[in-house]
Image: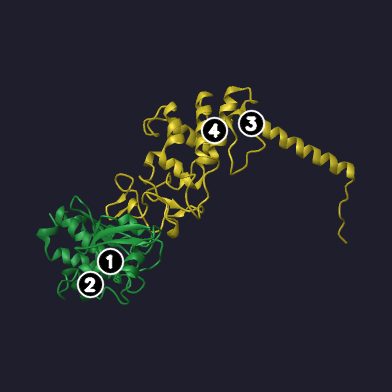
Amino acid sequence: MTALSLTINGQAHGPIEVRDDLSMNDFLREVLGMTGTKFGCGAAQCLSCVVIVDQPDGSSVTNPTCVVPAVNFAGKTIRTVESHARDGKLTALQTAFIEHFAFQCGYCTAGFLNEGQVLLERLAAKRIPRAKLEQTILEALDGHLCRCTGYVRYHQAVRDVILADPARYLT
Amino acid sequence: MISVPRFSVKVLATAAMCLATSFLVLLSVRGIAASSSANTLAPPESFNTITNRRQRSVALFNELGKVIMSPRCTNCHSAGDRPRQGDSQRPHEPPVFRGADGMGLPAMRCNVCHQKSNYDPARMPGHEPWAMAPVEMTWEGKTLSQICVQIKDPKRNGGKSLAELVPHFGDDGLVGWGWSPGVGRTPAPGTQKQTKALVDAWVKSGAACP
């Protein structure tokens, strides 16, 4: 057992005693009741379970939760899908997902949303030429599986958000 | 009616004797100890019966080849920019790619899944660092002879001298993971200590290639 403390969506959690073999996904869903983070394949192959990890250097990455023990997140600052909308107001990315009808069952959406958000933040920190945008989006969303609508609509939605504010994301 | 050939006991015994003799000759030429199987490594001393220095060196490297050709090594010494996984050496899922530093693309770094140690509940292997071998060190699809030449070439082995290959095989942590790969993966043959002894003996015998 380990006493786990971490920050989730700006709120401190812990110390909470957890088994050392408890997955982060089970910790979020079963211990904290934060079911926005999905459990899909259980093998980091669909990435529906990713959360955002905020690094000390100000950058962020997504991290699968189904294949990583919760104790490995000790002391970290993470964001889950529940962090996006504020006071019931959706983000531009969430709105774009809806407008593009990017999802049907929605099981993969939390993962795509977190991945898209990290991409937006990465581009805001380091802008790229328009010519590299399509490949950059492809690489960012690569690995996330969707069985309903395919991938084009997610791609288009992310692209639209970026092109709506080119001065912020593009050189 | 089909006629079935019939052999005398004497003919069959002679044939069996010939087969056994051929097998023993083959073993002595290769210098492989009779106790060495696919999952074990013969100790360097067992090759001392090979008096020809070059042949002994080649035999040592052939034994070392059991480790080098193991999926635990070739999966990340894979050709191209995508590692392989599992004993079946299937392409890595999810699709991940080498990236500029061999540790993945910006949106999918190796260490987001492969953490400091194995996480057996999810059958996830781990070690810090976790990375693909550099592209000039790919082994997949090459013969043991080609790999041997490559391993000796400082331009394709990370600038290592022959002597420096010994601690790479024998003491490196990520290499050592190959013998502790967690559930669902077959460990590399033998032990890392035995492998180190074989590399050391191979280098001291002239580092000849098959």
Q: Are marks 1 and 2 on the same chain?
A: yes
Query: At 14% from the left edge and 74% from the top edge, which residue is drawn?
Result: A87
In space, the residues marked 4 and 3 are separated at their CA atoms by: 11 Å
Q: Is residue B125 left or right of residue A113?
A: right
Query: At 51% from the left edge and 35% from the top edge, which residue is drawn?
Result: B193
The reply to whether residue B140 is in sight is: no
For disc 3, the neighbor class at 10 Å (few under 14, some 14 to 19, many from 20) is many
Please tell me the numbered disc located at residue A97: 2
Circle 1 chain: A
> Amino acid type of disc 1?
Phe
Chain B is shown in which shade?
yellow
Total numbered labels: 4
Chain A is shown in which shade?
green
Q: Cβ–Cβ below 8 Å for labels 1 and 2?
A: yes
For disc 4, the neighbor class at 10 Å (few under 14, some 14 to 19, many from 20) is many
Name the residue tied to disc 4. Answer: B61
In space, the residues marked 1 and 2 are separated at their CA atoms by: 10 Å
Q: Is residue B122 left or right of residue A38?
A: right
Circle 2 chain: A
